[in-house]
Image (cartoon, rainbow, N blue to C red):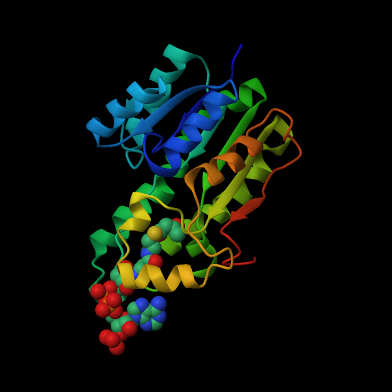
Amino acid sequence: MARVAIVTGGTRGIGEAISVALKDAGVTVAANYAGNDERAKAFTDRTGIKAYKWDVSDYDACMAGVRQVSEELGPVDILVNNAGITRDTTMKRMDHAKWQEVMDTNLGGCFNMAKAVWDDMTGRKYGRIVNIGSINGQAGQYGQVNYAAAKSGIHGFTKALAQEGARTGITVNAIAPGYIDTDMVAAVPEDVLGKIVARIPVGRLGRADEIARGVAFLTDENAGFVTGSTLSINGGQHMY
Ligand code: CAA
C-alpha cells in the first residue's frame, strides 16, 4: 500500500513542490494549509492532491487534523513540517506578538505535528519526518530575530528527536533552504534582495523543486540510515 504523507503549508511555495514531488514518488499526500482557501482549491484542481485546513500553531487542531487524515487516507508514514511565516523587522520595532506568532507557527508547529504522529509511528516502527529549517536559522539574518530563532530551534529539535526515533525506525532530518523563489522571498524589499542574491555563489535564487528533491530523498524507504542530518540547499551562500 502507498505510504501516506502530510505536508504542512503544502499548497503553496516550497510546500507545493514537496507535495507534488512526493505524489510523483507514489506517496498519497495530504497537503495542509492554514488560510488561503482560493490558492488551496487551485492547488487541488491542478495537482489532484487533497488539501486539509488547520493551523499548525494550534495543538488541538493538529491532533484533529492528523486524526482526520489517518481516517481518510491511512496512518501517516511521512511528516514534512514546512509551514512557516515571516514577520521581519528590526529588534527596535519587533513587538511581542511578532515574536510569538513566528515561534508558535514555525517551531511550535513542528512540535504539535510531530507529537500528533509520534505514537502511531512508534507503534508501527516506521516514520520519516523532515523539518524545513533555513539558512537564516544557521547564520542569522538582520531583521529576523524571531524567524532565525525559530528556525535555529528546528535544527535542535531535529537532532534531539532523531535520537529518540532511531531505534524505532523513525528518521528525523532537516533541510536548510537558502533564498528560494517564492512569495515569502518576493516580500523582501527589492534592493535588499538584490544584495542577498549578489552573495549567492550560484548567482540566482533557488527553485522550490530543488528543495523538494531533497525531501524526496530523505523520505525514501531506503534512507533509513540518514537521520539527524541537515541538508543545506542554498546555492553555496552558507557552507556549514
Ligand atoms: N546589515 C547591516 N545593516 C542593515 C542590514 C544588514 N543586513 N539591513 C538593513 N540594515 C540597516 C540599514 O542600512 C539601515 O541603517 P541606517 O538607518 O543607518 O541607514 C537600517 O538597518 C534600517 O534599514 P531599513 O531602512 O531597510 O529598515 P526597515 O525597517 O525598512 O527594514 C528589514 C528592515 C525588515 C530588516 C529589511 O531590511 C528586510 O526586510 N530585510 C530582509 C530580511 C530578510 O532577509 N528576510 C528573509 C525573508 S525570506 C526567508 O526568511 C526565507 C528563508 O528562510 C531564507
Ligand 1 in which quarter: bottom left
Locate residue 232 relative to residue 100 in the image: left or right. right
Residue 71 position, x and y percent, is 43, 13
Instruction: Indicate the quadrant containing the N terminus: top left, top right, bottom left or bottom right.
Output: top right
| In the image, residue 174 above or below residue 25 | below
Instruction: Indicate the quadrant containing the C terminus: top left, top right, bottom left or bottom right.
Output: bottom right
Q: Nearer the viewer, residue 193 or 35?
A: 193
Residue 63 position, x and y percent, is 39, 28
Locate residue 61 relative to residue 176 in the image: left or right. left
Locate residue 67 relative to residue 235 in the image: left or right. left
Res 198 seen here: yes
Q: Nearer the viewer, residue 216 or 7?
A: 216
| In the image, residue 53 above or below residue 204 | above
Locate residue 198 relative to residue 36 in the image: left or right. right
| In the image, residue 171 above or below residue 98 | above
Residue that sits furthest to the front in the current view: 203
Q: Quadrant of residue 97?
A: bottom left
Residue 155 position, x and y percent, is 56, 55
Residue at x 30% of width, y 30% of height: 40
Residue that sits furthest to the right in the current view: 225
Q: Nearer the viewer, residue 98 or 184?
A: 184
Q: Nearer the viewer, residue 218 or 205?
A: 205
Res 90 seen here: no
How many labels sit on residues? Answer: 0
Residue 108 position, x and y percent, is 40, 47
